[in-house]
């Protein structure tokens, strides 16, 4: 067991969630459109996290990414479990910092959401966007690893632009679970942001395998 990898995942996830969440709080405080602020907040936060700790752990910071890496046999089961635990702890710590800086209402405002009666649309959005995200991640980290540190954050940024109105554009169970817990907004809808990204990750991995070497259709 390499504890440095788990620590790197914890710190990287913390950076992603605290900066992304604070960008939402800042937008709400300054009465700026969240759709124009949050995508840059999360995209550039991921860039910072990758630069800071990605060389240690591979820079997952997301249980959906870890699931896809496990399916692709890039990490073993115990490492995958350790990564997910570290990611959840890092995300919860980040939402805890937002609570200290602001208040519980501010934390609650950073949680993912969707319009009333649109749970199905939100779930489909999370599946679709996570599948795209993982297809990019798996492909670029294998085919062009030198571009990964920039291609992946840019992909997350555009995913936020596309998905915020429909699902909040989480594509990351840890990122959605943390503010729901700390913000006191944990309810059955959380399954949209847990199940959706995990299904999307599996689909993205399957598409990657088909395109990469046709292994699933040989």
Image (cartoon, rainbow, N blue to C red):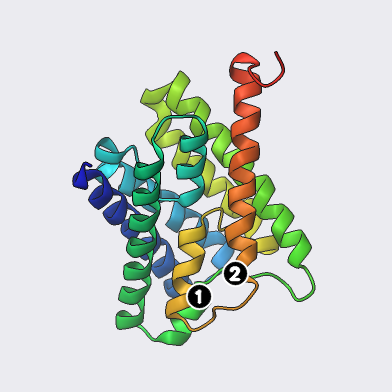
Q: At x 32% / y 57%, what residue is drawn? A: 15
Q: How crowded is mark 1: few (under 14 residues within 10 Å), some or many (20 or more)?
A: many
The residue lying at 64 percent from left, 74 percent from top is 188
Whether the residues at callouts 2 and 1 have beta carbons within 8 Å, the answer is: yes
Residue 158 percent coordinates (x, y): 57, 46
Q: In the rendering, which numbered label is found on residue 194?
A: none
Could you say which quadrant of the image residue 56 lies in?
top left
Quadrant into which the C terminus falls: top right
Residue 39 against residue 3 in the figure, above or below: below
Q: Could you tell me if residue 80 is visible in this image?
A: yes
Is residue 154 depicted above or below 95 in this figure?
above
Q: Depth check: give the residue in front, 207 or 45.
A: 207
Q: Which mark is residue 180?
A: 1
Direction from residue 79 to residue 120 in the image, left or right: right
Under tag 2, what secondary structure? helix
Return the mark for residue 190: 2
- Is 32 in front, or is 82? 82
Snapshot quadrant of residue 1? top left
Can the viewer see residue 30?
Answer: no
Image position, residue 97 (x, y; %)? 30, 74
Q: What element carries label 1?
A: helix
How far apart, in angstroms, are the residues tagged by discs 2 and 1? 8 Å
The residue at 46%/61% (across/down) is 175
Q: How far across and how far down the image is residue 86, in percent?
A: 33, 56
């Amino acid at each position: 067991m390499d504890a440095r990898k788990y620590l790197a995942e914890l710190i990287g996830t913390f950076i992603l969630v605290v900066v992304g969440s604070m960008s939402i709080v800042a937008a709400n405080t300054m009465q700026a459109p969240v759709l124009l602020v949050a995508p840059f907040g999360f995209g550039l936060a991921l860039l910072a996290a990758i630069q800071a700790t990605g060389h240690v752990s591979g820079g997952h910071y997301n249980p959906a990414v870890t699931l896809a890496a496990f399916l692709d046999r890039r990490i073993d089961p115990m490492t995958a479990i350790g990564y997910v635990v570290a990611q959840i702890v890092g995300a919860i710590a980040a939402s805890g910092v937002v609570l200290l800086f602001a208040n519980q209402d501010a934390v609650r405002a950073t949680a993912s959401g969707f319009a009333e009666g649109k749970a199905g649309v939100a779930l489909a959005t999370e599946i679709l966007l996570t599948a795209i995200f993982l297809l990019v991640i798996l492909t670029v980290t294998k085919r062009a690893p030198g571009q990964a540190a920039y291609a992946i954050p840019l992909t997350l940024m555009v995913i936020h632009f596309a998905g915020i109105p429909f699902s909040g554009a989480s594509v990351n169970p840890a990122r959605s679970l943390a503010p729901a817990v700390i913000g006191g907004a944990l309810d059955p809808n959380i399954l949209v942001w847990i199940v959706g990204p995990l299904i999307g990750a599996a689909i993205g991995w399957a598409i990657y395998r088909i395109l990469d070497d046709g292994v699933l259709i040989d």
